[in-house]
Amino acid sequence: MRNLTIILPGLLVAATGVGAGDLITGALAGNNLGPLIILPLIGAFLKYILTEGIARYQFATGKPLIHGWMKELGAPFKYVFYFYLFIWAYTVGGALLNATSSAAMLFVPLSKTALSFFFSGLAFCLVWSARFEIFEKLMAVLIGVMFIAVIGTSFFLIESPAALMNFSRFQFSSPWFLGLIGGVGGTLTIVCYGYWLIENQRSGEEGLRVSRLDLKVSYLLTGLFSCAMMVIGSRLPEVSKSGDVFIEQIASLFASQIGPFAAQFFKVGFFCGVFSSLLGVWQSVPYLFADIRLIDDHGQQDLKTSKPYRQFLAFISLASLTTIGLKFQSIQLLYAVTGALAIPLCALSLIFLFRKKEIVEPFRNKVFHKITLWSSFLFFIAYGINVVIKKFS
């Protein structure tokens, strides 16, 4: 039980990111690109470096990364970030709510609209009223079922080891490539890892050591999970634009290849995955809005009970409901690409913030960190330029 407690903050990052970046985007990417397991593994590695850097900055300064952004980039950046945060929350919240209600329709004979209202309201109430310890335990149960159901059953769908490295269907210009690399393991939610560290009262060198352990475990599971979803997606002959039909297609694949129990087990795991991600986003992202609003209020100790936190929680709960009528694949791709835009910002800021003199050993960037962070930044910038040119040429 103690070991589980140690890795819980990292598992929260995995649970929040997996439902968003790996479940649906991973399957759709696999359907479009094939079962290239190297891609999600690269994405998980890059996210580990970024999230570890976010933790190091917080342990070195005693403040979350968002404080460094506000201090160094000033008021203009604050308003740009506000705009991005609302757009990101709207698209991600909509994607998760659509996925959760689509998964629930497989078990409950209610309309997607009714289920969307129910789960948005349920997440709102749980986050508003529950203590962080209860939230952690609930998330641990959901992510446990999710990992066992999806990773375990996907092994039966692997055609051959060679198929996992077949680049014949790969296209660098495919938006699913960006969505997969950027979405695996979370996007903007990795910044929220710092607030979960505060909840767990971690600090200093010991906190960094424990965080490196929990992040390694979590991103290993995240990478394996995304690989499993790519394998599953690659075996689908086609992908429906309807969320509930999309899940049924995967369940039918399991039923024909493994058996009916595997199909039902996958449905349960899928639901746990998207609902855990929905809960994670509803609980974590309001921290960012509240912290920026209260950044100069040194007397504010508990962001979860603050007015800005609850205002943003209400926003994401209500705004997400307006996406119910959007096409399934459209909202999934929109949120994946929008979320991936946060990665170059995180990478570049971690490069320059660690150059400050107040950052001391052992928290400073090593050569390995610098190379990886610069590679992450340059990859997403180069890829973005390539996609824009291809789109409008």
Image (cartoon, helix red, strand yellow):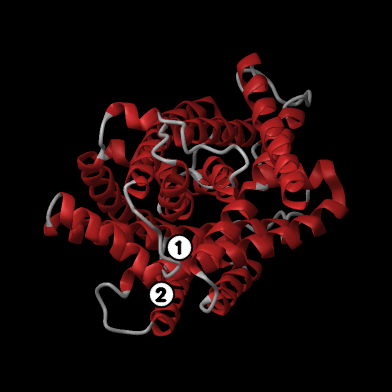
Q: Position of residue 244 (x, y in %)?
A: 36, 70
* Identity of the residue furthest to the top in this view: 367
The Cα atoms of the two marked residues, 1 and 2, are separated by 9 Å
- In the image shown, does 117 or 284 lie closer to the viewer? 117
Horizontal arrangement in the rendering, residue 15 relative to residue 308 (left or right): left
Q: Quadrant of residue 160?
A: top left
Residue under numbered circle 1: 278
Q: Residues within 10 Å of mark 1 (few under 14, many from 20)?
A: many
Q: Is residue 360 above or below residue 136?
A: above
From what the image shows, is residue 345 above or below residue 81?
Answer: above
Amino acid tagged 2: Phe
Neighbour tally class for label 2: few under 14, some 14-19, many 20 plus, Cα within 10 Å? some
Which residue lies at the image location 67% right of the left edge and 47% below the top edge?
A: 341
Q: Which element carries disc 1, helix, strand or loop?
A: helix
Q: What element carries label 2?
A: helix
Judge whether 40 appears above or below 279 on screen: above
Give the left or right position of residue 62, taking residue 16 as reference: right
Question: Dot 2 corresponds to which residue?
Answer: 119
- Determine if residue 297 is in view: no
Total number of numbered discs in the rendering? 2
Relative depth, front residue between 274 and 26: 26
